[in-house]
Image: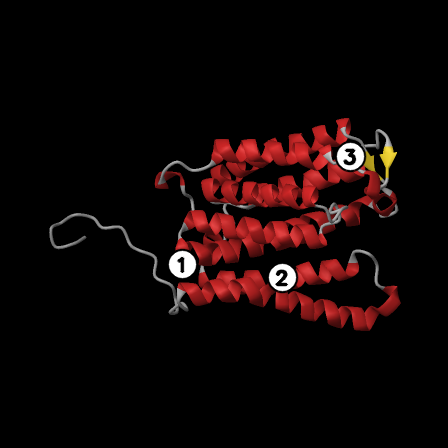
Amino acid sequence: MNRSGKETRPTFQPARPLPPAAARTAIALFIPPVIGAILATVAQNLLGAQSSTLALPSVFLGGIGLASIYLGMNWYGAAGLGLRGARPFFAGAGFAFLGWIAVLTARFFLGAIDESRFLQQPLLPSFIYLLFFEAFALQLWTFGLLFRGAADWRGPLTAAIVGGLTFAAAGFLVFQESFQSTWQAAVYFFFWGLFYGIVRLRTGSLIGVVLIQATQSLTAWFLLPPIRPVTAASLNPLFYIYLSAWYLLLLWRLWPKEESDYRV
């Protein structure tokens, strides 16, 4: 109660003073990948030629995730990182599901890629890698720690764009489904990252998007049989162009119109 007798809501006060928002954003952008790179280098020196195709990316992305959750839980807590369930979870999963449908459609009608590097790997370890490393660890960094710092510094919409671009760049470099280093593939990852960033902004949660991302990769590249096997060099460029156009349409529909649409 205040002096006038009206009830006042308590405001959140962090247990310790936080660094300035600009400093938190810089730390969030650089420290997790540095930690991941250090751990991956150590793992490479220890494993040598025995390292599998998933070992080093797992260590790199795992280091990013561990650094992000340590910093994020100390600075913002679980909700501040976007680890929200219930309605935000279902809303995020629902929006991300629209992108999943587009990937399956493109995969079915525009042909398959040489899947030998996928099908040689056991299904369960592959899904664990997709869920906890390519999806959760990377999104915890881009749409959790980095998103929150950039939102406090430059605003939520800027945070969604920064987080999306960082997700796109990291995915283009380390994701298993990054088959080509072409401008079509780069544009696809660009719009994919922005789409997930806007979903994070509109729903306030990344958990549903994490689950859909891992399921999307599993169903499209591990479970869906090839229609006409081709190599990465001969992949139909329309595959990435179609997906880019679909994500651009989703962005147009989901782009927030007013501040009440933000869920930081």
Q: Residue furthest front?
A: 183
Q: From the viewer's perspective, is residue 176 above or below residue 239?
A: below
- Residue found at x 84% / y 63%: 51
Q: Which residue is mark 2?
A: 64
Q: Which residue is mark 3?
A: 236
Looking at the image, is mark 1 or mark 3 nearer the viewer? 3
Between discs 2 and 3, the one toward the N terminus: 2
Q: Which residue is mark 1?
A: 153
Residue 85 in sight from this viewpoint: no
Between discs 2 and 1, the one toward the N terminus: 2
Q: Amino acid at mark 1?
A: Trp
Neighbours of disc 3 within 10 Å: few (<14), some (14-19), many (20+): some
- Between the residue at mark 2 and the residue at mark 1, the CA separation in whole angstroms equals 22 Å
Which percent across, then down, holds residue 88?
A: 48, 40
- Residue found at x 84% / y 59%: 52
Closest to the observer: 186 or 172?
186
Q: Amino acid at mark 3?
A: Asn
Which percent across, then down, holds residue 174?
A: 71, 54
Asked which secondary structure carries label 1, the reply is helix
- Between the residue at mark 2 and the residue at mark 3, the CA separation in whole angstroms equals 33 Å
Asked which secondary structure carries label 2, the reply is helix
Residue 63 in sight from this viewpoint: yes
Which percent across, then down, holds residue 97?
A: 61, 33
Q: Is residue 225 left or right of residue 175?
A: right
Neighbours of disc 2 within 10 Å: few (<14), some (14-19), many (20+): many
- Between the residue at mark 1 and the residue at mark 3, the CA separation in whole angstroms equals 41 Å
- Residue found at x 63% / y 43%: 187
Q: Amino acid at mark 2?
A: Ile
Between discs 1 and 3, the one toward the N terminus: 1
- The coloring applied to the image is secondary structure
Which percent across, then down, holds residue 196?
A: 56, 43
